[in-house]
Image (cartoon, rainbow, N blue to C red):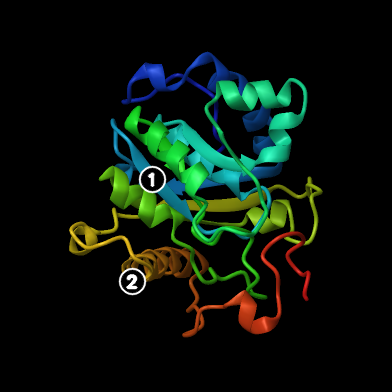
Amino acid sequence: MTESVRPTTESAHPASEKTAIFRFFAGVLIPLMNLVGRYRVRGLENVPKVGPFVVAPNHYSNVDPIVIGIGLWKSGRMPRYFAKASLFRIPVVGALLLKAEQIPVERSGNSRDGAGPLRQAQQIAAAGHAVVIYPEGSLTRDPDGWPMRGKYGAVRTALDAGIPLIPAASWGAQLIMPQSTNRLSLFPRKSVDIVFGEPVDLSEFADRPRDSRVLAEATLKLMTAITALVEQLRDETAPTERWNPTEHGQTEIGRFDDTR
């Protein structure tokens, strides 16, 4: 059964999560998203009721962060995202993003794990909040929309902060906003599925050094969990080999179909 999401205060979680700034964003975005989609959210029992955690979703449409935000709103928790630093330089918009504790990221492409933004994510986690980190780092370059190779940011934040890492997935947002465009498809109304998985068990990595080998192993475990959730939503089997943009001459910055 699908349902629309209403920006109500009903929640089993602390009311302090839904601060005035988040109610503002919800009041603007949720009515618009309800016009174009119906949202079925599963796995809310896997979202911690209190305390910090990292949410790691798949990334296949420019609108899927809002979709994941809808899922977290339903759980009573409010997301903090990595966002392009250029957005923070827009008058009013930048001030609102800072007020909502969103995390600016310079998309230079020169850092594999984004040490500066990760420190901010850890600070936000230390304050008890939920941080959304896309392990793919950008829109998937897989031509069929499957999760591609992951980066280290999500697992490193969870390991360094000692907090739960929740894999998540959605499917259907590409019908609202195709990957190749920033335009909403308004009609007909689309169905979108969202699922939060059980926390990824990172205990085997907790006491090991944070070198590239350990982070790669942990990230592989996370991407496997995310891909399994996407398979569940799509009722399909993912390719056995995960897409690696560098092997296909693709850049991970800019439009998803850019190549070099």
Counting residues from the start of the chain, the first of labels 1 and 2 encountered is 1
Three-letter code for the amino acid on which mark 2 is drawn: Glu
Amino acid at circle 1: Val
Q: Is residue 111 visible?
A: yes
Residue 249: quadrant of the picture:
bottom right
- Looking at the image, which is closer to me, 168 or 33? 168
Foreground mark, 1 or 2, reads 2
Based on the displayed image, in which of its 4 quarters is residue 206 positioned? bottom left
Residue sitting at 25 percent across and 45 percent down?
162
Q: How many marks?
A: 2
Could you say where residue 37 lies in the image, as x and y percent from the top left? 65, 44
Name the image quarter holding residue 96: top right
Instruction: Residue under label 2, please give it.
Output: 217
User: Does dot 1 land on a helix, a strand or a loop?
Assistant: strand
Q: In which quarter of the image is the C terminus?
A: bottom right
User: Label 1 to label 2, Cα distance in Å?
Assistant: 18 Å
Residue 108 percent across, percent down from the top left: 67, 54
In the image, 150 versus 198, the foreground residue is 150
Residue 101, image x, y percentages: 52, 27
As drawn, the label of residue 54 is 1
How many C-alpha atoms fall within 10 Å of the one at disc 2: few (<14), some, or many (≥20)?
few
Helix, strand or loop status at disc 2: helix
Side (left or right) of 175 relative to 64: right
Badge number at residue 161: none
